[in-house]
Amino acid sequence: MTDGPIRLLIADDHPMFRYGLRAALSDVDGITVAGEAADGNAAVAMAGDLGVHVVLMDLDMPGMNGIDAIGELRRRLPEVAVLVLTMYDNDESLFTAMRAGARGYLVKGAEQEQIVRAVRAVVLGEVVFGTGVAERALAYFAAAPVGGRAARPLPELTDREIEVLRLVADGLNNAEIARRLFLSEKTIRNHISSIFGKLQVDDRAQAIVRARRVGLGSPEPGGQGHTTERR
């Protein structure tokens, strides 16, 4: 627990949303809104400069996005808890944020009371999920076998490459995958080239076949906008 009030930084690129959050949280006992950041770079810099305990982080911001900012904060300021507050209510965003180091995940529209409870919980080292998100997170972790990590398919691929391959197998093109994972299209192309090399396949169609054999992606090809992109 902190000595004194919890110092909070709001990181979101929408000024009116930041204003609304500040107004909603400023009068809460035990919480001080120490500052506001409009992008990930500012959030990382201000978190250290202002000595905050919690960063309330949006994911979709210009410059350094929220996912990369979470990773930077985890490396530079591991004592700072990141609580995601985003419009993205999907598994890819949830698990990418948690793997990056977020301690909580709420979807915009959460009530003030829920946000306050979550802020106080992550300061204590707890992990917090919003309604609906919690059900999917529990189902994900419940699927792992007791006593160890689940053996994952294609162990030659990194976790990020597995994420990319799963979305390729779902039929998403590079631009869609980049938006889903908050990465650049160039980074996605690099990941796909690495995947092709490791799996020794020549194109997306062959990669999708390999992915489906191990249970990645939708049951039917082209379930979400199948593309003919090679990489």
Image (tube, rainbow, N blue to C red):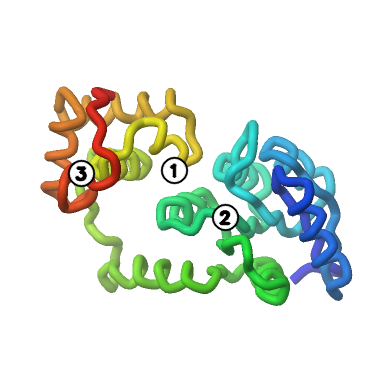
Mark nearer the N terminus (1 vs 3):
3
Indicate whether 214 appears above or below 161.
below
How far apart, in angstroms, are the residues tagged by discs 3 and 2? Answer: 32 Å
How far apart, in angstroms, are the residues tagged by discs 1 and 3? Answer: 22 Å
Indicate whether 187 appears above or below 103.
above
Residue at disc 3, secondary structure: loop
Give the residue at mark 1: 180
Circle count: 3
Residue 53 visible here: yes
Q: Is residue 136 left or right of residue 218?
A: right
Give the residue at mark 3: 154
From the image, which quarter does the C terminus lie in?
A: top left
- Please state which of the two labelled residues, at mark 3 or mark 2, is closer to the viewer: 2
What amino acid type should be assigned to the residue bearing mark 2? Met
The residue drawn where x is 72% and y is 58% is: 54
Mark 2 vs 1: CB contact within 8 A:
no
Q: Is residue 22 left or right of residue 231?
A: right
Q: Is residue 82 left or right of residue 116?
A: left
Give the residue at mark 2: 87
Residue that sits furthest to the front in the current view: 225
The residue drawn where x is 63% and y is 40% is: 61
The residue drawn where x is 72% and y is 43% is: 43
Residue at disc 2, secondary structure: loop
Mark 1 vs 3: CB contact within 8 A:
no
- Please state which of the two labelled residues, at mark 1 or mark 3, is closer to the viewer: 1
The residue drawn where x is 70% and y is 54% is: 55
